[in-house]
Image (spheres, grey):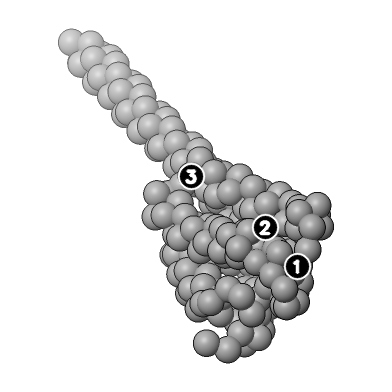
Amino acid sequence: MAQLGVALVSAGSALSGAIIGGLFTLLKGRQDARERQADREEQRRQQRLDSRRTVYVAFLKELAQTTDKFLKLYEFRVPAEEAAWREAILPVIGAYNQLFEARLQIEMVGPAIMAAQADRVVEQVGIILEQYDKAYGEHKERADPAQMDSLVAGTGRTINRINVHRDRFIGAARVQLGGDVNEFPVEALRDHLGSLAANFEE
């Protein structure tokens, strides 16, 4: 009888050990699964941030290139043949289209607040383009020669608005990327557009 009791106790201990071991294995498996899930989520988050950073930087670079090309419009002189005007304005239109494409990429990677900020920048750039094309149509046959920037009122104010919306875009991007905007050509853009605005007396 004593031997039977010892055998039962031993069997019970072995069974308890197996159950406890199984529980530990199950808990460790669940912990490992949670860690793997957390790693996957972190990887997805980092990939999303990297995609956004790339797209935001591309938008700002397109903005810099577009504003560079606007110099041809500012310095264009009338009267002038339409062929000469087309030669001056077509590169600007091409750059504007590239800027708009970069804005569409922002809409794809998100979030909506960044697309809205980019819209405001693109809108102001489009205003300058429309103003200068309209001014050429009105003055292409004028008797006294003139440079286009003297014929379009408010160019300096429009450039300043581009500056404001660009800075807001950058500020919003810092929030979205956790402050990591080292690749942004921030100072170069600010200096460039600031010097452009200073060329216009209101």
Badge 2 is on which residue? Answer: 62
Residue at screen point 45% across, 36% down: 37
- Tag nearer the camera, 2 or 3: 2
Task: Give the percent coordinates (x, y) of residue 112.
Answer: 40, 49
**Which type of secondary structure does the marked residue at label 3 adopt?**
helix
Quick check: 13 left or right of 5? right
- Disc number at residue 107? 3
Q: Is residue 47 above or below residue 131?
A: above
Q: In front here: 31 or 182?
A: 182
Badge 1 is on which residue? Answer: 79
Residue at screen point 37% across, 27% down: 26
Separation of residues labelled 2 and 1 (CA atoms): 30 Å
**What residue type is disc 1 on?**
Pro
Q: Is residue 41 above or below residue 58?
A: above
**What residue type is disc 3 on?**
Glu
Q: Is residue 14 visible?
A: yes
Q: Identify the mark nearer the N-term, 2 or 3.
A: 2
- Tag nearer the camera, 3 or 1: 1
